[in-house]
Image: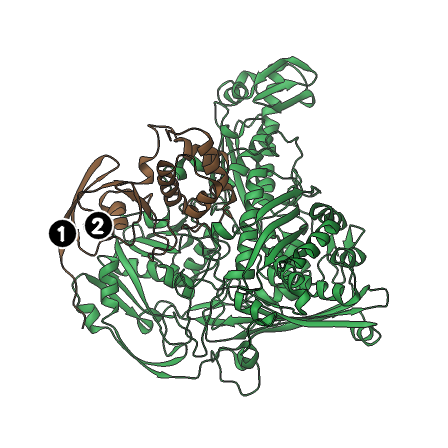
Chain colours: A green, B brown
Amino acid sequence: MTWQTSSHRSTPMVAARSVGRSVLRSEDPRLLSGGGRYLADLSLPRELHAALLRSNEAHSRLLAVDVSEAQALPGVHLVWTGADVATFCQGIEGALAVDGCIATVMPLLARDTLHYVGEPIALVVADSRAIAEDAMELISVTTEPLPPVTDPNAALEAGSPLANEQLAGNVGLRGGASFGPVDECFAVAHRVVEETYHTGRLSPTPMETRGVIASYDWASQELKLWTSTQMPHLIRYFVTAYLGIQENLVEVLTPDTGGGFGQKAHLFVEELLMPLASRELNRPVKWVEDRRENLMVAGQAHEQFITIALALDSDNHITAMRTRALGDGGAFHQPPWSMAVEPWCAAAVTPQGVYNVKTLEYTYEAAATNKAPVGAYRGVGYMAGTYAREAIIDEAARAVGMSPFDFRRLNVVKQLPWVNGQGVTYDEGSWLESIDRLEQMVGYEEFRERQLAARAEGRYLGLGISVFVESTGESTAMGKAHGLPDVYHDTATVRMDPNGTVTVTLGLTTQGQGNRTTAAQVAADMMGVRPEDVTVIAGDSTRHTYGSGTVASRGAIIAAGAIGRAAGPLRDKLLAVAANMLEISTDDIELADGRASVRGDSEASVSIADVATSVYFDDSVWPEGFDPGLEATFAYDAGRPMFSNGAQAALVEVDPFTGFVTVDTMYVIEDCGTVINPGIVDGQIRGGAVQGIGAALFEQLLYDDAGQLTTTTLMDYHLPTADVIPVFKIEHLQTPSSHTWNGAKGMGESAMIAAPAAVLNAVNDAIAPFGAILRDIPITPEDVLRAIGQVTD
Amino acid sequence: MIAMPSHTATVAMEVNDTTVAAAVETRTSLAEFLRVQAGLTGTKLGCEHGVCGACTVLVDDEPTRGCLVFAAQVDGKKVRTVEGLADGRALNRLQQAFHENFGLQCGFCTGGILMSMTSLMEKEPNPSREQIVEWLSGHLCRCTGYETIINAVLAAVAGGEDLR
């Protein structure tokens, strides 16, 4: 496979000074003193407040919506139903640009049919949120029930009722591919291992819910849209496209954001409804989601049924694999990721993981159901795919009587670069080393002795491992490598001021990752100054730089790439002027620690602040034809797919009387190339792994057979708390990427990707003496007790 | 047809040593009063069910869920919020320990956690790790995985008895 090479896909090389250090976060003092300004904290003069009446039925004909009493309530300014907003916008189209994805159009407010609990029926705008909610109680909705479709497997059977008339056969996605002689390998296999695994339906649950404020001004025709989003530029593009407002008249602003995790990387109907209402009323309109709405409708995630078959030869090598991924898609595609991204990514993107299996086939399907639409959540597709693969690798190891480390070592790719069966090149990594290192870290042999001793006391310890490789820094090249024709690029502006401080403007937003700090470290090294001399504006407004979104572990790579490119010409100018000031060749000057110094001569230097001042104010030291601008904007897109890798082990104890699983220790080996800021990177690991533990043991959105969501508060949807977290032992292997100047690769999702399989495998190791095995998550105490025969019907 | 509430009450409380008085609808929660009437938005609403703990403030020194208490119930009482923690224009020792230990990421849950930990350290100047975990378990943080928060509180505890 050849790669298009463009100048926006390479960056200059400089030595790291602040990169690699746990620089304290510049974000913290403001957030620690209550000074954060999140969406709900913003108020505009004359603002009105919106609330949405949502369906409490999963599937019904919508016969009538009577809003007359609500409209008459004092303090109510506007009540709209589906018919009212259809005149402005027919709905938002969703589909992923992969083979076999069938698009849907989601109305902004329901028209003839209700497709899921939580689907918006009416918008109310009033003087206060409380009055808007009072008015909602006065809306009368008349419906006629339709059969709810709640089981994705049954949904695909012939004769199933339709969840959404736009999707024939309830198929939102169906496709697949085959590489090499798969049937032949299975026909001659010494052993075939095949199982089906289910990952539960999750809510990303950022602590800050979604929210939108729209302010349209008829005189200037300008729309300002504040939204708690990970992708403001895409939102602006959609808003202009769907509402017919010129792009230069729309500014999308992103205030402090209280977590995103992929949930806030979608276009939601509220981001179109509030601008419409503001334009209608000529007043700002504010909508802040409540937690019930967040759990009901804000991008549910991760639920899949994945069936994997491995063909083994007599030496226990995996000769071929088959993967079938089925996603429970909900009723519509939520743009841009849609119900397709989970099963497509799980099946089609690195289905073989780190294992040397070039003969494989996969199929992916998304079934429409009468549930809320699914979307992206940290480790989208990767978590479920890695979960199922690492679970069956353990089952295969057990079947052939090998240790989970030895079986993985036997089958792991040992020589990189490696081209997989689909033609994707993996440039570098520490795949084998991560398995070896993890085994040493956990002290495997010693653990087995401890495990036996514990069993003699009636205690059940288990160790489970999970090895992953992950595409990071979502780029055009990454998409094309996997068959997704999306184009990505981001710009950064770097400006040095006359006194030598630096302002960086990114297209990337931040939801808590500390991007402002890591970007400042990157810029500081490029410009030879300290991180505290750099201010980073991270995607606050679409007025400035462009970004493809803070998604898919892009932050470190995009920051390094775009800042690196924009800072390059500024460095050249500083060097040229410093050379004149020091009367020496530019080749002999180094920019570091706030000074332009002559290499090998510690006495001969000038401060970078003085050089900057000269660039602005002293033309006597300018070279011939010098352009004094110390500001540059450049685009960046990673030129090749970049993969991080690693391995995790979970040490658990299962209580055979209560069924409760305690995760005692998480061992983490992470290789994301150069670590820009260990404090921040380790924070991503711990936070991601705890989300993975939540997925493995606690969290699940549950629908009953009528399609009613039964987990609508945080008392029912159980997030991990401080009393259930493990001890963390984290080690970094650093295999730098040769395609970013500082060697960094992405890692925001990796711990979430790896942890659930490690926990499942550990539980299965613990309950093996009972002859029991579990394959579905979350693993509840009841599941454990049933598996080990303590509870029977 | 449900009855629409129209009752108002005049509520006065001392918030971070400043008296705040306002006539509000009786259904106004303490958290909403602090955010709107007192203009102190550091108190966050994460669930409005008393589960997540982001709205935790100290009412007469006791940790209290701002979303589960009506403002009128706090009439005449003393309230402390995250905005009152700093020592003049410097972070206090607990805040500084969160900074130095990477004890926060998005910051949305942080204010409530700081208030609970302040109360813990006032009641028990030398809390054990287990006590910290128990108190912290009343709060949800989705970003950090909690370990750095526990480490931050331990570091603050190790720094002496007076939080300032």
Q: Earlier in the sequence, mark 1 or mark 2?
A: 1
Residue A29: x and y in percent read 42, 35
Q: Which residue is mark 1?
A: B9
Classify 10 Å Cα crowding around label 1: few (below 14), some (14-19), many (20 and above).
Answer: some
Q: Is residue B22 left or right of residue A302?
A: left
Is residue A745 found left or right of A103 in the rendered image? right
Residue at 57% from the left image edge and 37% from the top image edge: A566
Mark 1 belongs to which amino acid? Ala
Residue B53 on image: x %, y %: 37, 50
Does B50 sit above or below residue A535? below
- Residue A770: image quadrant is bottom right
Residue at the limit of the structure toward the top, as seen here: A603
Relative to the observer, which residue lies in front, A438 or A251? A438
A241 sits to left or right of B67: right
Residue occupied by mark 2: B71
Q: Residue at x 47, y 70 (%)?
A: A702
SS state under label 2: helix
**Location of the C terminus of chain B (image quadrant):** top left
Q: Disc 1 sits on a residue from what chain?
A: B
Residue, x 41% and y 76% (percent of image)? A58
Quadrant containing the N terminus of chain B in the rendered view? bottom left
Label 2 neighbourhood size at 10 Å, few (<14), some (14-19), many (20+)?
many
Extreme-bottom residue of the structure = A159
Q: Residue furthest front?
A: A457
Q: Is residue A431 visible?
A: no
Residue A273, labelled with which disc? none
Asked if one can make out residue A700 in the rendered structure from this viewpoint, the answer is yes
The local secondary structure at tag 1 comes to: strand
> What is the three-letter code of the residue carrying label 2?
Ala
Determine the chain carrying the residue at label 2: B
Q: Quadrant of residue A205?
A: bottom left
Cβ atoms under marks 1 and 2 closer than 8 Å:
yes
